[in-house]
Amino acid sequence: MLRGDAAVAFKQLAAAYEKHFDQAICLTSAYRDRALQAKLYAADTVMVAMPGRSHHGLGLATDLCGGIEKFGTPQHEWMKKNAGEFGFFHPDWAQPGGVTPEPWHWEFKVDEYPAND
Ligand SMILES: [Zn+2]
């Protein structure tokens, strides 16, 4: 589940990915409500954003699998090259040299983020 505009864009990205790899894109997680975010945060305060701080709570973030979850794989490289065309990006903090490197985490870019609490 994603915010409407992000969901439409993600469907297009997923179709392009599937056309290229002949395999459906693998999605681990997208929207998380506050209760789930709190539960995840309680289990891991380092890797998991505080409730109210995650873009998963806005329905703008995806966690992907199927190879995308590792840096340097063809799937991850494809995302780096093509995600931007569909409005998705890999945030700086999730890059190999970022605060918490998360190759799987990709977000839909919006000009303004709504309140998240
Ligand atoms: Zn994520």
Image (cartoon, rainbow, N blue to C red):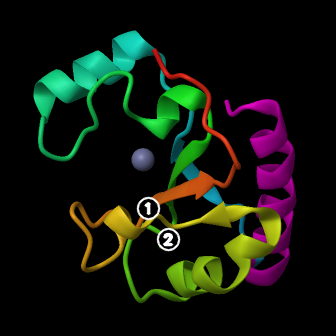
Q: Residue at x 52, y 79 (%)?
A: 76
Q: Quadrant of residue 5?
A: top right
Quadrant housing the N terminus: top right
Q: How far across and down, in percent of the image, does residue 94 sit?
A: 35, 65
Q: Quadrant of residue 105?
A: bottom left
Looking at the picture, does residue 103 appear above or below residue 30?
below
Q: How far across and down, in percent of the image, does residue 27 sit?
A: 57, 49
Residue 34 or residue 71, whichever sits in front: 34
Q: Circle 1 sits in a helix, a strand or a loop, which is it?
A: loop
Q: Residue at x 13, y 35 (%)?
A: 44
Looking at the picture, does residue 96 appear above or below residue 60?
below
Q: Which residues are magenta?
A: 1-21
Label 1 C-beta lies within 8 Å of the nearest ligand 1 atom: yes
Q: Residue at x 48, y 25 (%)?
A: 32
Q: Residue at x 55, y 87 (%)?
A: 77
Name the residue type under label 1.
Trp
Label annotation for residue 104: 1
Which residue lies most toward the front here? 112
Q: Circle 2 sits in a helix, a strand or a loop, which is it?
A: loop
Q: Quadrant of residue 106?
A: bottom right
Residue 52 or residue 6, whichever sits in front: 52
Q: Is residue 12 magenta?
A: yes
Q: Is residue 49 left or right of residue 83?
A: left
Q: How far across and down, in percent of the image, does residue 21 sit?
A: 72, 80
Q: Is residue 17 left or right of residue 105?
A: right
Asked whether disc 2 touches disc 1, contact meaning CB atoms under 8 Å apart, the reply is: yes
Residue hosting label 2:
68
Name the residue type under label 2.
Ile
